[in-house]
Image (spheres, coloured by chain):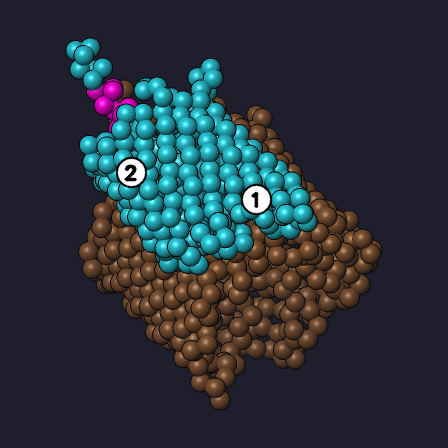
């Protein structure tokens, strides 16, 4: 009986792991995501937006637990050699009950324009998650007080993600996004997992119209993701790597 | 413990927390939008203190004015009460109605023999104060004669031998408490008598009038929503303690009842605000604004006869109205209302004639095609010259175009899913040269369970090629546990090729003993060429709705605590614009891109 329980819990945790890491690849980081990542984990991603100038978007995060509470430290950068917009993030979350989590992250923003300007700003984000058997809800409020470097130059958004599991392999993620500066955006991702090793996702955005796909592969402690996206202004290609040295 | 006992206990438990009407407001929030919380609250307060007698056929119909039951639920309750003499309101539990629906209306109904509430609650007091920051230009420049606080006081009490007294006093930001000659700012008063003999009611002070379908006089609160298919007039006059400064009457009103015949006689004398036109702003802060206050004399006398039997209702109203803004010549109105039910069909109509010259008419046919479906056909016509200062706003959703044909359809797939659709073709009646025709479509699909509620609305309105607008509204609510619920609202308006949008979330947390409540709300909006409606979380005594235009955020935090018979509340409201450095214009201007409001209230009930 115990062996059955043990096998079942391992299967469940591997399944959960395979699903939840995908949240890291979104265009925002909801602090409640870190609660789902139960073991220490490293994550890095780079997206090249314009190879000619070297404009890119890169992220590096580490997730760990201290006294049963999960934390995340991260560094993100957008720009190129002469223009660098960086963000340092620390986040944690609180379990409210078996289904609900509340998360908070603090961000230190730093903007450097070569030999002309330097700016620093602080902002915070709030997140709430609610999970039941077949679906999950995520609320994310980014920079709710609209803090900025000078004027309206930091993103301030409200995002709702609804994830619905069609079956154990297939799920949909519908994202409603309302930005103060750019208005409404609607995104959808359909994701298929094969034997917890391969992952295929189709990405669509309806406002502005964008599309793309992503392929993931998991082997041992590593997960690789490769992504191609046709964006409204440019093409982007990216690669992501997740390393998890200890299994749950 | 049997099922009935469990239900009875759960209803009893609800009573402890229902006095602040949050349960009722939760239903309204999930079922409709663009409502006026304060006016609706006033209706609930009225029936909370004076519950509807389930053994009185006329009174039962007033359940409809609460807007807390579906058409189907109303029909079941009315049919049951019509054929049974009830000994207790708990007898309604045997009906095929959700227990949640009964909980919502429980505090507003009674059976006199066993009624404990109506005798126990004899008086209540409310006071509220609101402060704005930063101060408006009018306050800084001392253009506004009053303090920058908004204040509100209300007291109601039962007196002996069927009499009731109510006083309401309110002043807005920048308004003084007293004007010249000890004229108190926005004072409402009423003294009411409820009789058991032929004289059914007598009231002095502020009141509302509802005649027929409201073609000329309909000042009571109605949810302004195209999905409410039908409306039946119930009370000709109704005491009001609302703070509204327009759309009411003041004087004396009475009702006599002789068998099936009701006779209403009412007179009103008051002074309207405005100079040549009626001023509906209700704001009198500067010398210029104060000059508009109480300028136009207005008199009204009315006599109505109403006969009501099981299947039909006939109502004839005769009114004389005179006002200085209409040359002070008397205007004579005759209104004939007729309603007849025949099996599963109901026909109703109102025709109004003014000075035997101008007229308006509305004809309705409502058919229940099954227990779950309802179809309504409506035809309306109105001459432009007909008096329209006090008509009810039932046709607001068609922009007041009152020549038209409307049909509505409603179907309940089951207890959870409901579909509603309304199609309206209308024609302008205010311009003879430029004939303007329009059409509007309203659809709504909703799914409601105790734990989860969702609603999707689509509205399309076409007036001309340059005036067409589409609107999507999304609503989703989840009970995270028995004490916490969260909802998300999305508003999306397509106007002239641009999308105007807002997304809002509200979190409601109640303590386990139901005495403390916290609400948090956050909204991001991006509206470039059409305003977006925003409604904050329910907070007693505060009108928490706005039309937002531009780019920015609105966030609200409120806390309410109940201590014995007293409830205290504090709310902070913060709005920040990202696309401007100053907000407003004229005296209302502030030199900051943000506005904040702090509201406090205290409510006591005996």
Tag on residue A85? 1
Residue at (71, 72) in percent of width and height: B275
For label 2, the residue is A216
Above or below, A161 relative to B257: above
- Chain of the residue that carries numbered disc 2 in the rendered image: A
Above or below, B377 relative to B565: below
Helix, strand or loop status at disc 1: strand
Where residue B360 sits, quadrant-wise, is bottom left
Front residue of this view, candidates A220 and B209: A220
How far apart, in angstroms, are the residues tagged by discs 2 and 1? 28 Å
> With B525 as the anchor, is A96 left or right in this view?
left
Where residue A233 sits, quadrant-wise, is bottom left
Magenta residues (range): A8-15
Q: Residue furthest bottom?
A: B433
Front residue of this view, candidates A43 and B37: A43
- Chain of the residue that carries numbered disc 1 in the rendered image: A
Q: Which quarter of the rendering shows the N terminus of chain A? A: top left
> With B77 as the anchor, is B299 left or right in this view?
right
Chain B color in figure: brown
Front residue of this view, candidates B364 and B58: B364
Q: Main secondary structure of the magenta part?
A: helix
């Amino acid at each position: 009986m115990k062996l059955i329980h043990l096998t079942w819990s391992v299967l469940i945790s591997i399944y959960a792991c395979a699903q939840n890491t995908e949240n890291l690849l979104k265009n925002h980081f909801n602090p409640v995501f870190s609660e789902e990542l139960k073991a220490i984990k490293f994550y890095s991603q780079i997206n090249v937006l314009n190879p000619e100038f070297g404009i890119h978007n890169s992220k590096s995060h580490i997730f760990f637990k201290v006294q049963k509470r999960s934390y995340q430290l991260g560094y993100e950068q957008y720009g190129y050699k002469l223009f660098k917009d960086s963000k340092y993030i620390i986040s944690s979350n609180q379990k409210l009950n078996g289904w609900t989590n509340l998360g908070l992250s603090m961000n230190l923003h730093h903007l450097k324009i070569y030999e002309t300007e330097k700016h620093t700003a602080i902002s915070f984000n709030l997140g709430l998650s609610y999970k039941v058997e077949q679906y999950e809800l995520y609320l994310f409020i980014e920079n709710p007080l609209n803090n900025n470097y000078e004027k309206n130059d930091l993103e301030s958004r409200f995002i709702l993600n609804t994830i619905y599991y069609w079956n154990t392999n297939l799920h949909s993620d519908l994202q409603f996004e309302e930005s103060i500066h750019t208005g409404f955006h609607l995104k959808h991702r359909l994701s298929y997992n094969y034997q917890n090793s391969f992952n295929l996702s189709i990405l669509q955005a309806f406002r502005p119209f964008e599309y793309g796909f992503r392929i993931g592969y998991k082997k041992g402690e590593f997960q690789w993701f490769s992504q191609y996206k046709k964006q409204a202004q440019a093409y982007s290609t990216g690669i992501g790597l997740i390393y998890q040295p200890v299994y749950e | 413990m049997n099922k009935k006992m469990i239900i009875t206990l759960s209803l009893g438990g609800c009573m402890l927390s229902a006095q602040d009407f949050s349960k009722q407001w939760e239903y309204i929030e999930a079922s409709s939008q663009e409502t006026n919380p304060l006016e609706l609250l006033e209706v609930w307060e009225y029936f909370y203190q004076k519950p509807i007698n389930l053994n009185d056929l006329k009174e039962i119909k007033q359940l409809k004015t609460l807007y807390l039951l579906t058409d189907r639920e109303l029909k079941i309750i009315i049919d049951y009460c019509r054929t049974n003499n009830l000994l207790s309101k708990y007898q309604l539990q045997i009906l095929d109605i959700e227990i949640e629906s009964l909980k919502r209306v429980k505090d507003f109904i009674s059976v006199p023999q066993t009624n404990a509430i109506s005798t126990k609650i004899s008086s209540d007091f409310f006071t509220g104060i609101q402060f704005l920051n930063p101060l408006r230009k009018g306050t800084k420049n001392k253009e506004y004669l009053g303090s920058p606080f908004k204040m509100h006081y209300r007291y109601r009490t039962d007196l002996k031998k069927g009499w009731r007294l109510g006083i309401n006093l309110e002043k807005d930001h920048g308004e003084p408490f007293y004007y010249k000659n000890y004229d108190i700012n926005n004072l409402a008063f009423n003294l009411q008598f409820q009789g058991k003999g032929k004289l059914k009611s007598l009231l002095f002070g502020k009141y509302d009038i509802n005649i027929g379908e409201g073609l000329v006089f309909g000042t009571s609160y109605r949810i302004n929503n195209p999905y409410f298919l039908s409306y039946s007039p119930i009370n000709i006059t109704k005491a009001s303690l609302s703070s509204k400064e327009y759309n009411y009457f003041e004087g004396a009103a009475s009702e006599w009842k002789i068998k099936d015949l009701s006779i209403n006689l009412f007179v009103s004398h008051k002074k309207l605000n405005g100079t040549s036109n009626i001023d509906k702003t209700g704001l009198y802060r500067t010398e210029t604004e104060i000059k508009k206050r109480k300028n136009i004399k207005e008199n009204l006398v009315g006599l109505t006869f109403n006969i009501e039997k099981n299947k039909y209702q006939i109502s004839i109203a005769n009114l004389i109205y005179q006002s200085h803004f209409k040359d002070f010549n008397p205007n004579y109105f005759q209104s004939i209302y007729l309603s007849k039910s025949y099996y599963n069909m109901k026909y109703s109509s109102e025709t109004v004639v003014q000075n035997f010259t101008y007229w308006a008419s509305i004809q309705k046919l409502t058919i229940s095609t099954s227990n779950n479906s309802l179809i309504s056909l409506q035809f309306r016509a109105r001459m432009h010259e007909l008096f329209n200062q006090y008509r009810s706003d039932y046709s607001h959703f068609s922009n007041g175009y009152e020549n038209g044909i409307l049909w509505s359809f409603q179907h309940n797939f089951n207890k959870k899913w409901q579909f509603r659709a309304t199609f309206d073709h209308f024609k302008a009646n205010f311009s003879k040269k430029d004939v303007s025709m329009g059409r509007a479509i309203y659809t709504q699909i909703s799914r409601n369970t105790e734990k989860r509620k969702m609603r999707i609305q689509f509205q399309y309105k076409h007036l001309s090629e340059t005036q067409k607008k589409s609107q999507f509204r999304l609503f989703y609510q989840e009970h995270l546990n028995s004490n916490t619920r969260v909802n998300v609202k999305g508003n999306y308006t397509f106007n002239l090729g641009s999308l105007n949008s807002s997304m809002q979330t509200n979190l409601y947390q109640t303590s386990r003993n139901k005495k403390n409540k916290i609400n948090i709300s956050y909204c991001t909006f991006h509206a470039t060429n059409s305003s977006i409606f925003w409604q904050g979380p329910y907070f007693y005594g505060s009108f928490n709705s706005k039309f937002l235009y531009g780019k920015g955020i609105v966030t609200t935090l409120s806390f309410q605590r109940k201590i014995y018979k007293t409830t205290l509340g504090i709310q902070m409201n913060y709005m920040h614009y990202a696309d401007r450095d100053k907000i407003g214009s004229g005296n209302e201007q502030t030199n900051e891109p943000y506005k904040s409001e702090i509201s406090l209230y205290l409510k006591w009930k005996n």
